[in-house]
């Protein structure tokens, strides 16, 4: 029987600390605006996470505001703000969390020899003194304080025990051991947590946690090893987002613990049927595609192509499936809708896909759905998700056209070796802008021609760094799903930043234009507009 249905009554509870809005947002190009963060925060509450790390308040006014706004709307989970063991950081976190129903301040300071010597230039004693002072100051704002010894996995175990004992005595209720650079192995992760449990005299007064990075591809394995040793909290992100190679993927650690409850004897309060919808939401908002072969939530996670596998599945599902697709949020039937399907059918399918739209949004999406159905015989779930994603990117949260965004209007093109030309029309702030390029102005193929036209209209210093194309669904009438990464220079700071973009269309050139505009709109378009 399904492990996620038949759970052992004695299973130990593991706290799920989601840092998608903080560490996950630090993935290159994955920044989110405040409305997007609120949408993700609500989804995380529905998913059942225990703690939402909403940002690093002191780092920027935007981060402060996002933590503040998330604090106002979240009910049912703790909202956490990150802070260095510095008075200004902690005060900012406390102010940002003032409206939170269950506030948590997460303070940290580096403890490894390399960080003490080269970054902090502090002695062991000075680091402990700063850590204790940070925890005590945070306790002045809320009772729920978490402490992290940054680069804990490369900290001497004797010294790590001293630090942990001191911060618990100062009032930390959770002590998180970060594998900041993804250097750990599962055995080391297990041994470290076991050592802390056995050697720190007041360890029973706090929850031990781990925060694992995936630089060596072992983040999930390291987190699970820590749980096996007695850790009570895992810090993770949706789709494994995060700096560099990312963090432990929430969906993977949750389903590993649930599916192998015979090994771990633990569980979480995560509603696993919300995993796929939440994964798709975060992918849509960040613009970072989930790989097809991604464990748990990837498109191929439950696909069986080999004949022997298909035969086994038909006879008994558990021959080749250790989880059911439905248990993580996939739907049984993919091919469901056509041009004769009505608004109610679309709304019902959206609900099954974990997408809930207000009436005004649903009306707009339905109108676009009917246009799509006129051109495509069969509408797949992947088409519906792509349609909603496109709509969400090109409109504001209220469903109205976002005036400050560049929007696609039309294009016409002549390709070939003789006299190539393109005419492109975009709109912004209610006004249309058009450009015509031809002959010597154009080099390369149709996508390059379209990109040059976009650059000419927007007057932005952008460079197309990556371009990827994939079919949204099966069949010759499939839409093109295009991912791009653009580089944009800042004339003032000379800094070059990367922004991902995504566009969907039957027309590859139109999809490419929409993808580039999506990337441009992730920055403040008004800053570089003509």
Image (cartoon, helix red, strand yellow):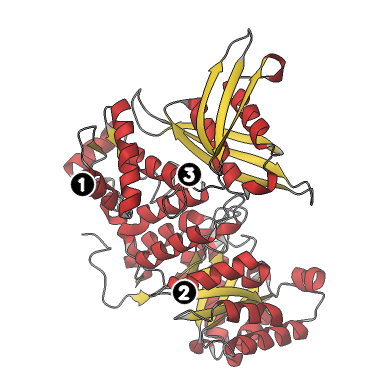
Q: CA distance from mark 2 to mark 1?
A: 33 Å
Residue that numbered label 1 is attached to: 344
Q: Quadrant of the C terminus?
A: top right
Work out whether residue 339 can be spotted. yes
Indicate the position of residue 524 as horizontal and vertical percent values.
63, 50
Q: Mark 3 near mark 2, Cβ–Cβ under 8 Å?
A: no
Kindly identify which residue carries mark 2. 72
User: Is the residue marked by circle 1 packed among few (<14), some (14-19), or many (20+) residues within 10 Å?
Assistant: few
**Could you say whether the residue bearing mark 1 is in a helix, strand or loop?**
helix
Q: Nearer the viewer, residue 110 or 68?
A: 68
Mark 2 and mark 1 residues within 8 Å of each other at the beta carbon: no
Q: Nearer the viewer, residue 215 or 525?
A: 525
Q: Residue at x 23, y 64 (%)?
A: 5
Say which mark, if any, is on residue 249: none
Disc 3: which residue: 394
Left or right: 439, with 22 as reference point: right
């Amino acid at each position: 029987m399904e492990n996620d249905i038949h759970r052992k009554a004695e299973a130990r509870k593991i706290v799920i600390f989601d840092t998608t809005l903080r560490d996950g947002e630090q993935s290159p190009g994955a920044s989110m605006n405040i409305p997007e963060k609120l949408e993700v925060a609500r989804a995380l509450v529905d998913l059942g996470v225990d703690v939402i790390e909403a940002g690093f308040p002191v780092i920027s006014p935007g981060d402060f505001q996002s933590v503040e706004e998330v604090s106002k709307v979240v009910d049912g989970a703790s909202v956490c703000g990150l802070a260095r063991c510095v008075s200004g950081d902690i005060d900012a976190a406390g102010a940002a969390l003032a409206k939170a129903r269950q506030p948590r301040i997460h303070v940290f300071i580096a403890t490894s020899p390399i960080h003490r010597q080269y970054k902090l230039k502090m002695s062991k004693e000075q680091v402990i003194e700063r850590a204790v002072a940070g925890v005590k100051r945070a306790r002045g704002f809320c009772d729920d304080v978490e402490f992290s010894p940054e680069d804990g996995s490369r900290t001497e175990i004797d010294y790590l025990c001293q630090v942990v004992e001191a911060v618990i005595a100062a009032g930390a209720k959770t002590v998180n051991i970060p594998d900041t650079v993804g250097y750990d192995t599962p055995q080391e992760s297990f041994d470290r947590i076991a050592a802390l449990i056995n050697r720190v005299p007041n360890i029973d007064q706090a929850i031990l946690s781990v925060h694992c990075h995936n630089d060596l591809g072992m983040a999930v394995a390291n987190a699970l090893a820590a749980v096996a040793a007695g850790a009570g909290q895992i810090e993770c992100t949706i789709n494994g987002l995060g700096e560099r190679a990312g963090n432990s993927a929430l969906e993977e650690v949750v389903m590993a613990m649930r599916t192998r409850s015979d090994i771990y004897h633990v569980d979480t309060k995560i509603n696993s049927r919300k995993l796929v919808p939440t994964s798709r939401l975060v992918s849509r908002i960040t613009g970072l595609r989930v790989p097809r072969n991604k464990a748990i939530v990837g498109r191929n996670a439950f696909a069986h192509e080999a004949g022997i596998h298909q035969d086994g599945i038909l006879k008994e599902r558990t021959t080749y499936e250790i989880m059911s697709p439905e248990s993580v949020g996939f739907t049984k039937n993919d091919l469901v809708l056509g041009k004769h399907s009505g608004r109610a059918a679309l709304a019902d399918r959206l609900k099954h896909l974990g997408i809930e739209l207000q009436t005004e949004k649903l009306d707009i999406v339905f109108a676009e759905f009917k246009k799509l159905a006129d051109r495509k015989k069969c509408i797949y779930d992947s088409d519906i998700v792509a349609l909603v994603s496109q709509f969400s990117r090109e409109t504001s949260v209220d469903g109205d056209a976002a005036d400050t965004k560049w929007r696609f209007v039309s294009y016409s093109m002549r390709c070939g070796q003789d006299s190539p030309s393109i005419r492109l029309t975009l709109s912004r702030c209610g006004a249309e802008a058009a450009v015509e390029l031809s002959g010597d102005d154009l080099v390369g193929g149709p996508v390059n021609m379209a990109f040059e036209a976009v650059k000419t209209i927007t007057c932005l210093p952008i460079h197309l760094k990556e371009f990827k194309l994939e079919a949204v669904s099966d069949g010759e009438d499939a839409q093109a799903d295009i991912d791009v990464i653009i580089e944009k220079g800042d004339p003032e700071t000379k800094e070059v930043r990367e922004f991902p973009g995504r566009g969907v269309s039957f027309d590859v050139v139109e999809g490419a234009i929409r993808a580039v505009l999506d990337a441009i709109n992730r920055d403040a378009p008004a800053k570089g507009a003509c």
